[in-house]
Amino acid sequence: MEGGRQGLESLVAARRSLRASLDKSRALGAALARAGPRLEEIQQRLPSLEAAVRPIRAERGALVAVGGHIDRAVGPAAAVLKVFDAVHGLERSLLADPLTDLPSYLAVLKRLEEALRFLSDNCGLAVQWLDDIVDYLEDNALADLRFIGILKDSLASLKSSPSLLDGGLLAAALDKLESEFRRLLAEHTTPLQMPPDTGDAPTIAASPIPVPVINKLRSILERIIANNRLDRCISIYVDVRGSNIRASLRGLDLDYLEIKPAEFSDVQSIEEYIDKWSRHLEFAVKHLFEAELKVCFDVFERAVPREIAESCFAEIAAQAGILAFLQFGKTVTETRKDPIKLLKLLDLFATLNKLRLDFNRLFGGKACIEIQNQTRDLIKRVIDGACEIFWELLHQVELQRHMPPPSEGSVPRLVSFVTDYCNKLLSEQYQPVLNQVLMIHQSWKQQKFQEKPLTEAILDIFKAVEANIDTWSKNYGDITLSHLFSMNTHWHLYKNLKATKLGELLGEAKLKEHEQYKDYFAAHFLRESWGKLPPLLSREGLILFSGGRAKARDLVKQRLKDFNKAFDDLYQKQSNWVISDKDLREKICQWVLHTIVPSYRSYMQNYGPLVEQDASASKYAKYTAQSLESMLGSLFQHKTGRTMSLNIRHSNGKVSNAMTNLARSASTVS
């Protein structure tokens, strides 16, 4: 029973197995039926696959050997391509305006620089490795020659291509940075106006560009310098900042700086310009150039050597016109020599000396060598010219001794000019400057300078003036006019030197001497002229009693006739004479009145009736006391007289007119 059951189970299992095998056969048949079209497709593609692998006609073992070399060459090339993709990804950021976010822009630019450095270092190497693999394939006949030729052409094109690794992206980004550099400078650069008084201004002006902007400019410079474009940035800086200084100076109307010596006659013609020059130069140095040097160092000094910043500043200063200021000073030194020029040269020196430390600080670098040379040349010209005129003054005063004195007896213009001029030289404004100029000039000659020779030279000049006065007084043919001239001149010296620097140098005793000379010559003038008229109205022999009346009338007529003639002659002669000082003129007129009028009035009161009834009375009683007073009170009035020119005689003996109008010179000194 159990044996039958086991046989039945075996039959069932065999049946199942057979059925499963039939199912698999049917599935395999279906799969084969489906694979038929695909096999046909593969059969059709076999020719093209064969063509694709045809360049590689090597044995399997040879291909396995070259595989490692190919992997090592393709790896760097793939890395280079990856960096190229990264560079392309930066393009959008770098073509934007850096104004929106300058720090981010600079950071992206720095990434581009790093990428380009990587490409520059590795592109050539990757191409070389690929080139080596191609050579290996060719040498070992591992590929078709035509295929190898195509590869070689491609690699040769890569090696010889002049195109930039970034397609010009870096240059475009740097152009944008330079434009931003210009914009930042221009927006924070404003022309300055000259303050009313430059003397009270601070020596070092604060930088006109805010610190945050300075920092931005420095950041831009850092990238510009890293890419070797500093020269272009300096050109932008010089253009913007130089234009700003020129705009500041244009407001000062500096056309006078271009004036030529042929365009004016003497230094007095441009005296106003010289005063402007001093103020304008001080403003330019202390305000414009001082501030500009500070900005230059603020922007450039941390990024480049100091010499480059100084060179940039020197170019700005030259373009702005500092050399034009120095050239104007040279033009002044080339004007015709005269005493007023000495004062103007001292003004020039005082200005240059006041700015000496500023010039040394601003223009002391090697880049400013031209400015230094021009400045030294100007200072030498100023000192040489001033000393030459000063030491010739004595000789020029002595040369005037042969000139005729004023025909009207007034104070010679030379006297008033020289005394006023010497007071100018001894003033607090000029004496220290002249002392310094003389000291420098003596040091150039290796001579020791002392202040005493300056005062001695002034005293010698004054002594020459006194000698001239003495000589001129002896040149008058009329002794009374000589007395009037001497009185005029000595009083002028006393009155105009009292309480002055020259007066202090001469001393009180010397001044008193001139006052005494004035009194002496005034007394002699009156005695020798108007003092001779009262004796003509003598009362001697005039008997008015009966029998002597006719004789007395004749004597009165004769004496009045003599008086009238003497008075007319004297009045006519002296009506052209001049007493320059108003107080002295009034005093002398009063003396003359007191000498003449009381005597004449008394005489006419006593003896006038003798002739007044005569038919020819008007011939003798010609004047009344009142008419005499009027006439005598109008004497010695100042008139426009002849000028005396002070000439400079050169060492060659030729005389050049150094002061064509001494009156103008004297008023200038006063």
Image (cartoon, rainbow, N blue to C red):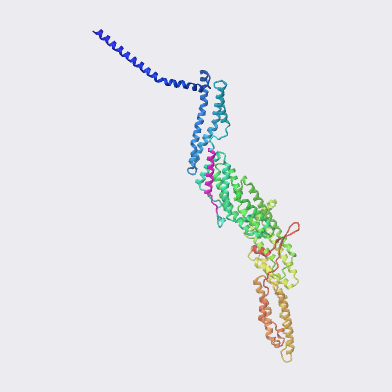
Q: Does the magenta stretch include residue 186?
A: yes
Relative image position of residue 209 (x, y in whole percent): 52, 48
Residue 450 in view, yes or no: no
Residue at 50 percent of width and 38 percent of height? 91
Snapshot quadrant of residue 430: bottom right
Snapshot quadrant of residue 508: bottom right
* In the foreground, 280 or 390: 280
Q: Quadrant of the C terminus?
A: bottom right
Left or right of residue 396: residue 216: left
Residue at 33 percent of width and 15 percent of height? 20
Relative image position of residue 401 (x, y in whole percent): 74, 64
The residue segment tinted magenta is 169-192
Extreme residue toward the left, this view: 1
Left or right of residue 401: residue 667: left
Residue 405 lies, with reference to residue 387, above or below; the image says below
Residue 170 lies, with reference to residue 475, above or below; the image says above
Relative image position of residue 158 (x, y in whole percent): 56, 30
* In the foreground, 231 or 542: 231
Snapshot quadrant of residue 2: top left
Relative image position of residue 73 (x, y in whole percent): 52, 26
Extreme residue toward the bottom, this view: 546
Residue 421 in view, yes or no: yes
Residue 609 lies, with reference to residue 275, above or below; the image says below
